[in-house]
Amino acid sequence: MNRKENNTVLHALLVLFSCTLLLGCAGKTATDKQVFTFNFDQPVTSLDPAFVRTQNNVWCVNQLFNSLLQLNDSLVSKPCLAKSWEISEDGLVYTFHLRTDVFFHDHPVFTNGKGRKMVAADVAYSFGRIIDPETASSGAWVFNDKIAGKQAFKAFNDSTLVITLTKPFPAFLGLLSTQYCSVVPKEIVQHYGKDFRNHPVGTGPFVFKYWKEGEVMVFVKNEHYFERESSVQLPYLDAVKMTFISDKQTAFLEFLKKKLDFFSGIDGSYRNDILTKTGQLQPKYQGRFHLSVDPYLNTEYLGILVDTNLAIVKNSPLKYKKMRQAISYAIDREKMIRYLQNGVGVPGNQGFLPEGMPSYDTTKIRGYKYNPEKARQLVREAGFSASNPVPTITLNTVTTYRDLIEFVQSELNAVGIPTKVELQQGASLREMVAKNNLNFFRGSWIADYPDAENYLAVFYSKNFVPAGPNYTHFYSKKFDELFERSFYERNDSVRYGLYQQMDNLVMEEAPVVILFYDQQVKLHQNSIVGLSNNPINLLSLKRVRKLHE
């Protein structure tokens, strides 16, 4: 470790020590402090809930702020700032009854520096701020096509908030649990303006204390937090410390030294050192720390442009449904997961909806399993033969997924679908996909909220790019009818049936080839208890404790 790194660590420790002293944790020595430490390999760009586009931002904001609702690990909406709610029969009016014991963190802007009570007007302001063009929030999509302006949010009194939608949206409660919908105090936001990004004040279990960008960040316990577990006030931790080591292998070495309590994500460069081909810890690490591999609402897929009205599609062999189906049959996903993913991921033999989604049901979806003979048969049925060979197709991806896509290339070549791979920069690939300039591309879809509507919207015809996420230009009148009907179905089991019908329609037409449903890989020290595992990969630390080893 060089002198600069030593100084940074020393400074962080001094800050952390002073922060915990400021909390007034009487009776505890410095060594008694429960400090949870983890690393980000990418920057945190903002602690303002209006700008939580990245996972790092989301994880931080989730410690500092609260939303009306929160999701449990089964992705069911539970009370948070709202203690109860009612929904009108037509599904348009949501009435929330708020807790009366929630206070914002202490701050000099508040009277006497003490955090004031959170009220319904704060929620209305926070939601209105998200859709305000002057805010330019990346989360405006949460409300934009569902309400008619800020007047949709009304505080009837300090503890009652009413939201009026322009059309039913059964997944609305899940949307309100997102970090974009965190509640902020107007006077603090106006005091700091854009600098609210690094002067956040919320109602969450931890209070912002220090941030030296790119080096260290510290949150400390909110001594006035409203949530309890078995009559014990949360959180258990005294502080949370985040480091910013950009090299994940270096960060893993810090984890091995127990300087980090938690480690998330394992890159291909050192995956073999940690995991066996079946996704278990290598023998040398067994017992040293805990490994969890859990569902993650992320579908990895290949997208195929299918709109024959587009010139780029007219001369492509992928315009034929049987060719697209042949690609799905040609890929040995089990082999791909075993040898390229070290067993991390679920083979994509079902539909577009991933494992972990509440409506996921392997018995209801007709997907594709590895069958190279079936693939060759479909190629012949599409009209191709030795005398009329399949033209070479181009599969576009980014460097990160090169090994994966080159495996796909070899599988397609083996069944008579000659394929070449082109590598693009991430921004360039996204732009070309949005402009319909690519016939065949690698993509992924990560859930913003835990409802299948979030996934199936990718195939709704009114969501053609650039206005929406229908990157393949898939169109089905039947699909659109089912999609629109689902908005008016409040019975979950019936709505899930509609979702499954839609997923089957997509699988039949094959505008996408499912590669795998991702999984989240997390490591934590044996002394850590209370970490949650949820399919949206949201880090929650309010119930985490550190045991003495």
Image (tube, grey):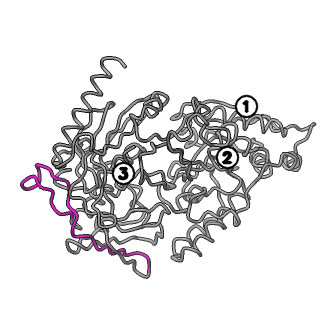
Judge depth for marks 3 and 1 and give the one in front: 3
Label 2 – label 1 distance at C-alpha:
18 Å
Label 2 – label 3 distance at C-alpha:
37 Å
Judge depth for marks 2 and 1 and give the one in front: 2
Left or right of residue 380, residue 394 in this image: left
Left or right of residue 324, residue 236 in this image: left
Q: Earlier in the sequence, mark 2 or mark 1?
A: 1
Q: Residue furthest bottom?
A: 89
Residue 299 image position (x, y, % from top left)? 60, 50
In this view, 61 is above or below 168: above
Q: Is residue 386 magenta?
A: no
Q: Residue at x 37, y 75 (%)?
A: 93
Q: Residues within 10 Å of mark 3 (few under 14, many from 20)?
A: some
Q: Amino acid at mark 1?
A: Lys
Q: Earlier in the sequence, mark 2 or mark 3?
A: 2
Secondary structure type for disc 2 = strand
Left or right of residue 338, residue 283 in this image: left
Q: Residue furthest top?
A: 3
Q: Is residue 116 magenta?
A: yes
Residue 146, by quadrant, is bottom left
Residue 508, by quadrant, is bottom right
Is 527 or 228 nearer to us in this picture?
527
Q: Main secondary structure of the magenta part?
A: loop
- Residue that mark 3 sits on: 545
Secondary structure type for disc 3 = strand
Q: Residue at x 16, y 44 (%)?
A: 22
Residue 542 image position (x, y, % from top left)? 34, 54
In this view, 217 is above or below 223: above
Q: Residue at x 33, y 65 (%)?
A: 80
Q: Amino acid at mark 2?
A: Leu
Residue 208, by quadrant, is top left
Which image quarter is the C terminus in?
Answer: top left
